[in-house]
Each structure stands twice: as C-alpha cells, then as structure tokens.
Amino acid sequence: MFGLFRHRTYRRLFAAQVVALTGTGLATVALGLLAYGLAGARAGEVLGTALAIKMVAFVGLAPLVGAQAHRLPRRVLLVGADLLRAGTALALPFVDRVWQVYLLIFVLQAASAAFTPAFQSLIPEVLTEEREYTRALTLASLAYDLENLCSPALAAGLLAVLTYHQLFFGTAIGFLGSAALVVSAALPKPAAREVRGGALVRSTEGARLLWRVPGLRALLALNLAVAAGGAVVYVNTVVYVRDQLHRAAGDVPFALGAYGAGSMTAALLLPRALERVRERTVLLGGGFAVAALFGPLAVLTVAAGHGSWRWPALLAVWAALGAACATVNAPAGRLIRRSVSAERRTEAFAAQFSLSHGCWLLTYPLAGWLGATAGLPAAVLAQGGLALGAAVLAARWWRPGRVVRFGLPVAARRATG
C-alpha cells in the first residue's frame, strides 16, 4: 500500500490532505472552547448551530461549485480554497459575537465544499490503475480516522503551552501547508468536456449522473444507512456512556475510539477483499451490516441494570458499526470512478459529497431529538428502521450483473454494459 508514495504527485497531494486534516482537527477543539468562551452554558447550542451551518454549506454549495469548476484551473481552485480557509481560521480568534462565529464557519465550510470534491476527483486521474486507486481510498480513510483519534491528543498537548485562540493559527498553518503542497505538485490536465445548459442545470448534473447509474443510485441509499448508524455514534455516545452505563466522562473518547478502530481495520482489509469480491457484494453487505447492528444495540439499550457486560458490548457494537460504515464509505470513490467518465467526475464527486452530507443533516437531529424527547430506544428503533429501509432500497436499485458507465460515447457505453 505504501508503495503508492513512489508517485511524486500523489505523495504531495496525500501530504496536503494530512496537514489540512490536522489543521481541521485543531479547529474542532478550538471552536468548542471558543463557543464556551462566548456563550458559556449555551455553548452546545452554538456548536449545534455551527454544525448545521456546516452541513447546509456542504449540501447547498458543493453542486454549485462543481458546476462552475471547469471555469478555473484546478490548481487555482484548490489553492484558492485553502487560502480562504486559512484566512478564515486567522479571523476566528478575534471574534467577540456569536453571529460572527456563524458567518466565519459558513465561509470556512463553503471553501471546504469547493476543495474536497475537486480534490477527490483529481486522485483517480493521478492514479490511473484501479488497484492503486483502491489503496489510495484506503489511505484516505485511514487519514480521516487517525485525524479523529490523534487531533484531540495533539490539541491537548498544545493547550499545555498555548491558548485555545492560538490553536486557530495551527489550523491556518495546516491550510497554508496544504496550499503549498498543491502548488508544488504536477497536476494532470483535465479531460476536455462539453459545457451544456445554464448554471442551475449544471449544478444538478452530478445528481442526475448518480441517479441514472444503478450502482450509484444504490450508493445514494447506502449513504443514508451509513448516516443513520454514524449519527447514533456521534450524537448519543455521551448519553450511553454517562447516563446509560454511568461511567466517567473520560470513557467517552474510548467509545468513539472503538468506532474509529473498527473503521480503520475495515479500511485496511478492503483492498484485498475487493480483489476477490464484487463491489456490489461489499457495499450492500456494509449497508445491511449497519442495519443488523441496530439489533444488538437495541438489546443493550433496553437491558435492565448496570451489568459489567454492557460496556464491552457497547465498544464491540461501536467497532462493528465503524467497520460496516467504512465498508460503504471507502469503496465509494472507486465505484464513481468506474461508473463516470473523467470529464464528468468533478460533478459526480460534488453530488456524492453534497447528498451524503444531506443524509447526515437528516440523521443528526433525528438521533438527538428522538433520544432527548422519546428516549434512546425510540431513537435506536427509528435509526435502525431508516438504515434497513435504505439498504433494502439499495439492493432493489442495484440488481446483479447491471454495469452502466455514464458520460461516454454511445459505442463505449455499449461496450461497458
């Protein structure tokens, strides 16, 4: 897998991703402390609103940016987005009003909505062999999981010698480092493409691409299954640990770490699995696994008493959910690459980015609101039903043996299925 780093361009782009993710992790910690400094006991409300703003920016802006991406050279788009993110991070330490936080978060996430799909669509053109690209997806998944595990520890170490305001400068350094690495990389020239329709038509082209290809239409449903499982973990872990199991606050990171460990394990195993098993089997298996894991989670949730078995059971379920979600998330880029021609990939990746985050925008509040008002059993039942329905729908949409590649000339499409 690490032989990929012999590719100079990929090596620099991967390094850009890692340093940007590190900066983002520092910003996550610093933002929570900034919210508490501005709002005190209302910090949770501020962070919840900021998270909603992030999702709205991702869902609403990614397709629009993808539709206009052809107007700018890739390097200009990527570096410009990084510079905008760095400038926004440098402004955050100086805010003194909550509305200013909301405005800057929107700008920051709008820049991320421009950067991420363009970056994702670039990698399959740098690594043209499918086997190498599959391993690159694994490394990207590992980078995200390691950021979730390591950034809080890094932030804690830095806070021993810095103020939380100064963490934002570390965020800016991460984005500036990402921009410098993109500048230094030799990026491939984009494929020639025909521009059709107005801005609104082009902004929905990616979604229409995903809808027309059976496997990608199924991926839209599987995104919902993953969001249903992940939302329970991210929103309700603290409730399970503190209220259900009556454990110390320090155990919350261990539970979240179990989810990350499961995700990393699955990502490491997937390249070999995809050499032996069809993508449809892997992706649908991951979706149904997410739904099935709500069964033991429901048993754990309604179990009476505070038996010692419930803590290791929670860790096991969280690790299995992490693995199941990674089984869908990690190969998604490979499926898009196989199904969409090079000149349409930016729109396809932008649509996947937008629509997948739209699923999280639905499941985050559902998990939180139902858990708080109707109790955790109701939240588990609702999210589990959502995951199962999404997996069944994906299986119905993606019949065995149907291979369609969109965006190619008619003769080429016939040749691929």
Image: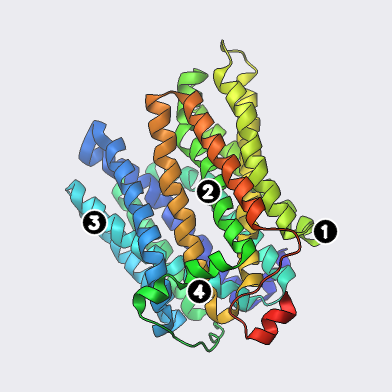
Q: Amino acid at mark 1?
A: Arg
Q: Which mark is residue 103?
A: 3
Q: Is residue 389 left or right of residue 270?
A: left
Of the two numbered discs 3 and 1 on the same chain, state the one appearing first in sequence: 3
Q: Is residue 410 left or right of residue 356?
A: right
The CA distance from mark 3 to mark 1 is 48 Å
Of the two numbered discs 2 and 3 on the same chain, state the one appearing first in sequence: 3
**What's the residue at 48%, 66% (across, down)?**
207
Of the two numbered discs 4 and 2 on the same chain, state the one appearing first in sequence: 2
Residue 336: name its quadrant: bottom right
**What's the residue at 71%, 80% (across, down)?**
414
Q: Which residue is mark 1?
A: 276
Residue 324 drawn at (x, y percent): 65, 44
Q: Is residue 140 left or right of residue 32?
A: right
Residue 94: name its quadrant: bottom left
What secondary structure is marked by label 2?
Answer: helix
**What's the residue at 39%, 59% (across, down)?**
59
Residue 311 drawn at (x, y percent): 60, 23
What secondary structure is marked by label 4?
Answer: helix
**What's the residue at 45%, 42% (across, down)?**
363
Q: Which residue is mark 2?
A: 224
